[in-house]
Structure formats: C-alpha cells, structure tokens
Image (tube, helix red, strand yellow):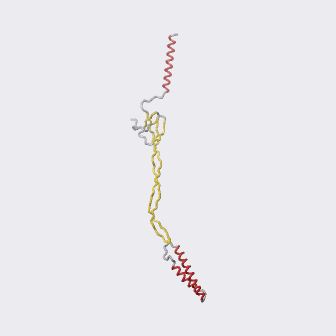
Amino acid sequence: MNKSIVIGATLSVLGLGGLGYGAWQVQQAPRESGPQFAEVVAVQPVTRSVETPREVCEDVVVQQQAQAPSRDPHRIAGTAAGAVIGGLLGNQVGGGSGKTLATVAGVVGGGFAGREIQGRIEANQTQTYTTTQRQCHTVMDTREETVGYDVTWRHGDLTEVSRLDHQPQGDRVLLEEGQPRWDLPLATSDG
C-alpha cells in the first residue's frame, strides 16, 4: 500500500471525527458557570373572606297594651244599674199583680243585661305602658385573611407562577434543575 494513501485515509478519519465532535458540542446547551437565578416579577397575595359571628345587645323602649285592670271585678255597678233601669221599665208595663211580676222580671233581666254590658265595656278598655327590653341579634364581622402568595418568576424565556404560603424574600430565587428553591434566603439584588 502506498504510504500517502494510508496517511490520507488516517487524516480523513481524524478530520471526520473532529467534525462530528464539533457538531455535537454546538448542539449542547452552553453550561453557565455558578448558580442560576430566576427573577421575581410579581407577588400577589391570595386572600379569603372569614366571617365571625358576634352577638350585639341593646336596650330598646317598647310600648305595650294590656287590658286595663277592672275596678269592679264582680260587676256589681253594672248589675245594680241594670236592675234599677229594668225595674223602672218593668214597672211601666201592666197593672196590679202583673205590674209586680213585670217589675221583678225587669229587675232580674236588667241586672243580667247590666252585668253583661259592663263586662263588654271593660273588655274593650286597654292600658298602654312603656317598658325597656334587652334585645339581642347576631351580626357577622368579615375580615380578609391571607392564605398564600402567587409569585410570578421568569428565567430566560420561561415565565411561571408558583403558589407559596409565605411572601418570598428578595427579587430573585435560586434555581436547582430549573425549579425555584423558595426555602432558601437570598440577597435582594445580584450585588
């Protein structure tokens, strides 16, 4: 074999291998030296409404009506007045023993009627009085409670939102394998 063919073939193989290795390196993502950080773009608190019941009491002036107490619970005045009027009317009817019978019937009927009339009049009489009553009702106190934070972060062309239970410290976050490490404290600037 010719020495120049061997040298040419060897150089060709080495040249093609070098080209392949160079192409492979071009396709690989450039490795940055040192830690990578994402920029914190926005922090939005996430809240919820919490309602707490509370009892509120106050003294209120109230007017009430009740049946007036009877000054004559046995209705004697009505019975007596009815008997007198009934007796007078009964005395005007008839003559002789019929007149006496009509007078007695007038006294009995008038007494019964007078008693009933007094009862109806007293039933319609009311008395108004004023009292102070303690009235209570429940009101709801509403307050906003922060339950977390939606944190928008950006690294290169990637923008993501993470939900945290605490507010992040600083304006950047350390990345490990492309994911933010919110549990690590950082300085507020690249420094």
Above or below — where is 120 with respect to 1?
below
Q: Residue furthest bottom?
A: 96
Q: How many labels sit on residues?
A: 0
Q: Is residue 94 left or right of residue 137?
A: right
Viewer-nearest residue: 176 or 10 = 176
Q: Is residue 85 left or right of residue 165?
A: right
User: Which residue does the image show at 47% across and 66% down from the upper left?
Assistant: 62
Residue 85 lies, in percent from the top left, at 55, 83
Above or below — where is 75 with respect to 162?
below
Residue 107 lies, in percent from the top left, at 56, 83
User: Which residue does the image show at 51% across and 13% down from the upper left?
Assistant: 6
Above or below — where is 83 with respect to 168?
below
Q: Is residue 143 left or right of residue 107?
A: left
Residue 11 lies, in percent from the top left, at 49, 16
Above or below — where is 148 with respect to 118?
above
User: Which residue does the image show at 56% across and 82% down from the upper left?
Assistant: 108
Q: Residue furthest left?
A: 191
Viewer-nearest residue: 89 or 102 = 102
Residue 44 lies, in percent from the top left, at 46, 43
Viewer-nearest residue: 45 or 62 = 62
- Quarter of the image where one finds residue 93: bottom right
Q: Is the C terminus in the top left, top right, bottom left or bottom right quadrant?
A: top left
